Image: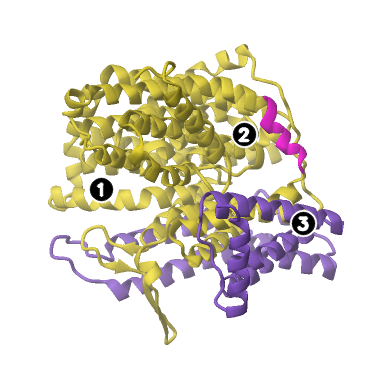
Amino acid sequence: MNLFGDWHALLIFTMGLLGGMIFGATPGVNMLTLGAVVLPFTVTMLPEHAIMLFSVIYCAGVFGGAITAILFNIPGAPENAPTCFDGYPMTLRGESGKAIGAAVSCSAIGGLASVILMMSATGAIAGWAIRAFGPQEIFALIFFGLAVSASIGARTLWKGWLSVMAGLLIATIGTDPVGGIPRFNEGSLLGLSFHSYYLSAGIHFIPIILGFFAVSEVFAQAMNIAIGTRERPQAGLEFPSAAEFWRVRWTMLRSVAIGFFAGILPGIGATLAAFLGYSQAQRWSRNRKNFGKGEIEGVVASETANNAATGAAMIPLLALGLPGGALTAMMMGIFQIHGMEPGPLIFINSGDLVWVTFAAMFWANLLIIFLGWLQTKTVVHLLRIPFRWLAPGILMLAIVGAYALRNLFIDVWVMFIAGIAGYLLRRTGYSAAGVVLGLILGKLGESAFTKSMQLMDYSFLGFFERPVAAALILLGFAAIGLSIAGEFRRRDEQRALLD
Amino acid sequence: MAVKGIFDAGSRNGGEFWKSFGELSAWLLLCGLIYSQTQLFDREIPEYEFGVAGWPRVLCIAAALGAVAQFCLQRLAARRTVEKSPEAEHAGFVGWRAVAQRTAIFAFPLLWLVLAPRVGFYLSAPFFVAGMLVLMEVRSPTRVIAVTGAIYALVLLLFTRLFFVALPVGRIEAFYDANVAIIGFARIGL
């Protein structure tokens, strides 16, 4: 397919790019909403057009979520959550243009790097991933990811871990991964009992995310307005300088590697990639004390890592037929609608379609730089609209987004309860992002753990018989030890200052 | 020695101690409650030795231990430092109007959640938007009406006319008819 010679393809490409960026940047809806809306229309499209559309939506949607994270402290998707930690403080300082500029450029760089890696070695990488990564390694990777990322966004290490624990506990609601037996769908306390069909299906993470980020942010700002302490963000149009990009080159490279590695593994994807990228940037940075206060390196790390995961997520889909997330599952559906089965044979039977995916993602990432630069100059003017006018609109979008997920009003209740909980968590120094990380990885982690236990005949030492799993678990424990030591050191420094 | 330090700190800095103690109690209560509820589905599965309740119970215990560790370290740290909480920084006299406004910020959406399925989304949404604007201290009636109209029109255009999202139309007959009429109006010409 000649993308620039076929006006129909060009139109679909442009619509996908703009749609992905707009849906990604609008609280309450995201790229999955757009994917679900356009999926039925792909039946009548040419297969290459349909695949191209979804590839472009995927790249643009992951980037789009950074805009609201930076401007309003509301991430468009969970993978943009770490972007808030430094992006929003930069906006408060009047450096919104710089933060969006960094997010744009690094999203494109991360995406392009992973597409190039994907083009060069999809088959080989997929083969390695499937051989080296069984349930033990998946569990070990989640353990490692949680160990190094748990304290992100929390006032102290312990509050970070407790936030993750809360997320993991919420993830246990619903059916268990082995026997399919419902958990917490009925309760009994002081002679009172209840039963809920809703809880049998588990709590969906979308209303929780909307609640923790969008609703709690509106509550927090409303309270600041009521108390009279709200800081008004300022619009800034300055783009990051070449020297600033050069200063964070190693962070970018590290985040590309982390994002690509996390993206290859089905189900792990961009969220863990962003958290890992951020936590590692903080660990290795010379300016680690500025993280969380508006350090551009934080924005660079999370946005490079989450976009690097997009290209890598195509590897298990194309080479093994394993979709890693909801949007890649929709892409698998498109292949099947058009009579193709992703897997090793797709390179032989439909090689041209594979290259359409590669090319579409490559061009989408390249164009994100240009469109993102335009956004830097335009979208920051949203900050000139008073937040008190925007807030009810954000709530409306969140309400419709939560309800439309399953046409259940109880999802809207869950969202508002999560909003109130998120507000209280923020006030007490806990991390809403930590809860969401635990919630997203909880089910996957438990499933990997149960399979590992069955495979290892219930011997915990079995993890140490597999080199990758053993290394990840040992690194996870080392990270916990270092974090605790760092916490004590920080307290000692505070005491010394006071003395 | 360490245990003595924990409670010494409590006696010297009562407010902080009770705050930490309250936080610990909340966590222990929550973990205990969740743990007790696991008994309702504590079944053995032939193919999995740890059973259905194993994983949530381990998480409950880990969270409880984490909360205890947090409490101990907070108290040990409080021997030397007295951290100012964000609430303390803004502490002062708060009038009844401010208290009512702050309560309403949380209570008003919950009230709307109770009413919306009965009255219908299309009828109740403008009142919700207008109410939130007033709570966010938009005082000019013209601005409240204009912003409410703009947001409502956008929602109707986007979700009712373009994406055909089926939002609640109310369970009470009169409200149901009104909601259906609004949907019909939003889709004129389709």
Q: Position of residue A373 (x, y in %)?
A: 62, 22
Name the main secondary structure of what is drawn in magenta.
Answer: helix
Q: Name the foreground residue: A186 vs B108.
A: B108
Q: What residue do we see at 49% from left, 67% from top? A: A410
Judged from the image, the secondary structure of the residue bearing numbered disc 2 is: helix
Q: Contact, CB < 8 Å: mark 2 with mark 3?
A: no
Chain represented in yellow: A
Kind of residue at badge 3: Met
Chain-order first, disc 1 or disc 2:
2
Q: Would you name the residue on which mark 3 appears?
A: B136
Chain represented in purple: B
Judged from the image, the secondary structure of the residue bearing numbered disc 1 is: helix
Q: Position of residue A490 (x, y in %)?
A: 57, 38
Q: Contact, CB < 8 Å: mark 3 with mark 1?
A: no
Q: Would you name the residue on which mark 2 appears?
A: A87
Kind of residue at badge 2: Gly
Label 1: how many residues lie within 10 Å, few (<14), some (14-19) or many (20+)? many
Tag 1, which chain? A
Tag 3, which chain? B
Separation of marks 2 and 3 at Cα, in angstroms: 24 Å
| Tags 2 and 3 both on a single chain | no
